[in-house]
Amino acid sequence: MTLAQASKHYGIPRKHLLNLYYHDKATGRCDRFRVEDGVVYIHEEYLCPHRHDIEELYMRALESTNGEEMAIAKEISKRTGKNVNTVYMYLRNFKFKNHIFAQTVIDILKEFIQAHNLFYAKGIA
C-alpha cells in the first residue's frame, strides 16, 4: 500500500511514515518500505514485517516438538545469547522490532524444523 493509503488506514500522519522511511533508509533497513517507479510502498505489517513468516515457522516448529514451546525458546536462546524468557515472550507475541534478530530467528527456526521433523530425517520432504 502507498504511504497515503497507509496514513488513512492506520490513522498516522503521512509525514511520520515518511520520516520512518527516511530513518530506515539512513540505517540500512529495507524490509518495511520499497520504492517502485518513484512511489514509496509500505508493508502492511510495517511495525513487524516478519510477523507472518515467524508465525508460520513457529507453528511448524511446535508441530515437530509436540507443542514444547520452551524447547524452541531454549534453542533460540542458546544460539543468540538472549534470555530464554525474553525469547519465549518474543515468540508468544510475535513482536520483533529488531529486524536483524527477526531474520536470525527465522533462520534458526528453519534449521530447528529440519532437525526435529521426521520427514526431513528420513529424506521424504
Image (cartoon, rainbow, N blue to C red):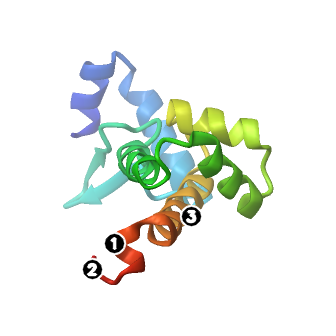
- Viewer-nearest of discs 1 and 3: 1
Mark 1 touching mark 3, by CB under 8 A?
no
Q: Nearer the viewer, residue 64 or 33?
A: 64
* Residue 94: x %, y % from top left: 50, 36
Relative to residue 6, is residue 109 drawn left or right? right
Cβ–Cβ under 8 Å for marks 1 and 2: yes
How far is mark 3 from mark 2, CA to CA? 21 Å
Query: Residue tagged by mark 1?
Result: 119
Mark 3 or mark 2: whose residue is earlier in sequence: 3
Residues at marks 1 and 2, CA–CA distance in whole angstroms: 5 Å
Residue 97 in percent (x, y) is at 58, 41
Whether residue 83 is situated above or below residue 102 in the rendered picture: above
Q: Which mark is residue 124?
A: 2
Q: Quadrant of the C terminus?
A: bottom left
The residue lying at 73 percent from left, 59 percent from top is 80
The amino acid sitting under disc 3 is Ile
Taking 22 as reference, is 25 above or below it? below
Task: Look at the numbered disc 3 and give the secondary structure of its residue.
Answer: helix
Q: Position of residue 92 (x, y in %)?
A: 54, 32
Amino acid type indicated by mark 2: Ile
> Foreground residue, 115 or 96?
115
Write the residue at 27% across / 47% down. Answer: 41
Q: Quadrant of residue 117?
A: bottom left
Secondary structure under tag 2 reads: loop
Label 3 sits on residue? 108
Q: Are marks 3 and 2 in contact (CB under 8 Å)?
A: no
> Does residue 119 appear left or right of residue 19 in this picture?
left
> Residue 28 appears at what percent x and percent y?
56, 61
Q: Residue at x 75, y 43 (%)?
A: 84
Q: Relative to the observer, which residue lies in front, 25 or 105?
A: 105
Dot 1 falls on a residue whose secondary structure is helix
